[in-house]
Image (cartoon, helix red, strand yellow):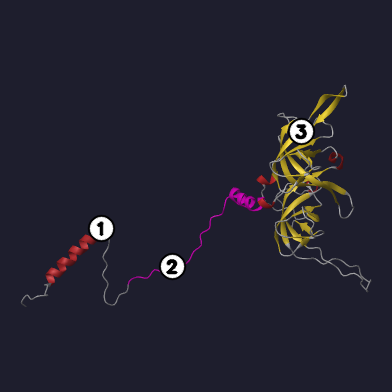
Amino acid sequence: MNDAIGYVPLKRLLALAALLCGLACSHGQTLHTFGAQTEPPIERLQAQVHSEPLSPAVSTALQRHSIEAFLSAPQVFEAEHANALARIVGAVGPRSMFSKGDVVYARTPAGTGFLLSPALPSEWNIYRNLRALKDPTSNEVLGLEGEYVGRARLLSDERLEQRQQDDKTQSALVPASFEIVHAISEIRAGDRLFQSKANAWRALTPHAPPSDLAATIISIYGSGVAYASKNQIVVLDKGSKQGVEPGHLMSIRKMPSLATGLTDSTYSVVPPSVGVSGQALVFLTFDKLAYALISDVSEPIQVGDRLSGS
């Protein structure tokens, strides 16, 4: 057959195909040919989940980061120690309420308790309203709760000075000076000062309490409300002496309400068992009391509700 325009001999086509194959292979590629009746292979993929657990240190840090903004620093005092606490007595001018940045004066009952020295802390917590917390069954006073309102830094000593007045030498008390460095509410004359301590919850590790551990909510901290919800603090009638520890994650069970005026007195009435209504994380303990943050709740919590380890 004569060569014509558009006609390429078969020998030249095969040579061109070999050349293309050689170029492709030299660049790391593979040229596949399929017959008219064959199909390219199909690879079927299945969805898979890959998980990697967080280390305990990371988990604890996340937990602490999520709850620390809601925590406070309440303090429980014994009755015999309450009267020995130092108190704020005033400031420059006639004001009776103070805030961050103000300089206030304070004194101890002894009159020489505040000294600028390495043996004495430079920062002191400020508390208000020493309120008696009682056992709901025995009515025993378990401690006096001080509500945390701020923190102050010691600037100058409390001291006695000898002064001349009417030709007589008299002893005069010069109160210590403090700068308020943190305040969550107004600081008032009469508020009490107590040595500042490191927050125990900075090393908090949530863990399960013993299954037989139980406590009762006797107060809702820092508020006058009747019901508590998520991220509020409650006070428990059990403390370190009864085995309650910071980090205990306890179940909340509502106290069932029973109708009064029953007409049938044949049987004694026992409160029915109820399910779990939420969880609370213990973050601060004293001898006979503990403080817990409500971390999860399905209905409002009130005084009288129970916490348990199971």
Residue tagged 1 = 27
Residue 160 is inside the magenta segment: no
Judge by depth and name the residue closer to the eye, 189 or 111: 189
N-term mark: 3 or 2: 2
Closest to the observer, 182 or 143: 182
Q: Can residue 22 be seen in this view?
A: yes
Membership of 60 in magenta stretch: yes
Residue 222 has which mark?
none
In the picture provided, is 187 more to the left or to the right than 139?
left
Camera-side residue of 263 and 109: 109
The numbered dot on residue 176 is: 3
Tell me which label, 1 or 2, sits earlier in the chain: 1
Residue at (68%, 46%) from the top-left corner? 201
Find the magenta span and give its range. 40-68
- Whichever of labels 3 and 1 marks the residue nearer the N terminus, that label is 1
Residue 286 seen in render? no
Spatial separation of the CA atoms under disc 1 and disc 2:
28 Å
Residue 45 is marked as 2
Which amino acid type corresponds to the residue marked 3 in the rendered image? Ala
| Disc nearest the viewer among 3 and 2 | 3
In the image: residue 64, left or right of residue 276: left
Residue 188 picture location, percent across and down: 78, 44
Q: Position of residue 180 (x, y in %)?
A: 71, 41
Tell me where residue 181 appears, x and y as whole percent: 68, 41
Determine the secondary structure under disc 2: loop
Which quadrant would the C terminus be assigned to in this image?
A: bottom right
Distance CA(mark 3)–CA(mark 2): 75 Å
Q: In which quarter of the image is residue 92?
A: top right
Local secondary structure at mark 1: loop
Q: Image quarter for residue 227?
A: bottom right
SS at mark 3 in the image? strand
Mark 2 surroundings: few (<14), some (14-19) or many (≥20) residues within 10 A: few
